[in-house]
Amino acid sequence: MTGEKIFYSIAEVSDKTDLPKYVIRFWEKEFTEINPDRRQGRRYYRESDIDVIFKIKELLYKKGYTIKGAKKVLHEKKKSDTSK
């Protein structure tokens, strides 16, 4: 874990996930699981936010879910993770 960044800018997240910035901003509004820190008008994403973005990308682009369906899958996963 040493040497790894704690926060990433939206440009870095866009590069890592191969998604346009506007898609990430839109998903942020749609999925409460993406919760970047905001300082001085900028978004700073944690590794956990990036993991969620990759999961959403997989659900929408590879598995063909709708946004509503992807929200349901993420919500159910979150519910099952908290019950453990």
Image (cartoon, rainbow, N blue to C red):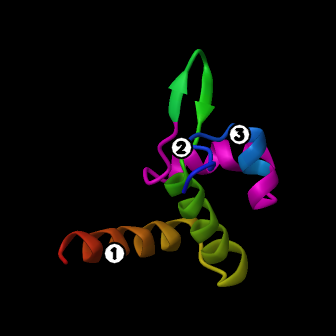
What segment carries the magenta color?
Answer: 15-36
Q: Is residue 1 left or right of residue 9?
A: left
Q: Quarter of the image for the N terminus: give it.
A: bottom right
Q: Which residue position holds label 2? A: 29
Q: Quadrant of residue 73?
A: bottom left
Residue 37 drawn at (x, y percent): 49, 33
In this picture, residue 16 sits left or right of residue 7: right
Label 2, secondary structure: give it: helix
Residue holding disc 3: 10
In-front residue for pair 80/27: 80
Vertical placement of residue 47 versus 76, above or below:
above
- The residue lying at 61 percent from left, 18 percent from top is 41
- Give whichever of discs 2 and 3 has the lower sequence position: 3
Q: Is residue 34 magenta?
A: yes
What x and y, as percent, mark residue 51?
A: 56, 63
Residue visible at 41% across and 71% down in the picture: 72
Q: Residue at x 60, y 51 (%)?
A: 27
Question: Do the numbered discs 2 and 3 sit on residues whose CB atoms are within 8 Å?
Answer: no
Residue, disc 1: 76
Q: Amino acid at mark 2?
A: Lys
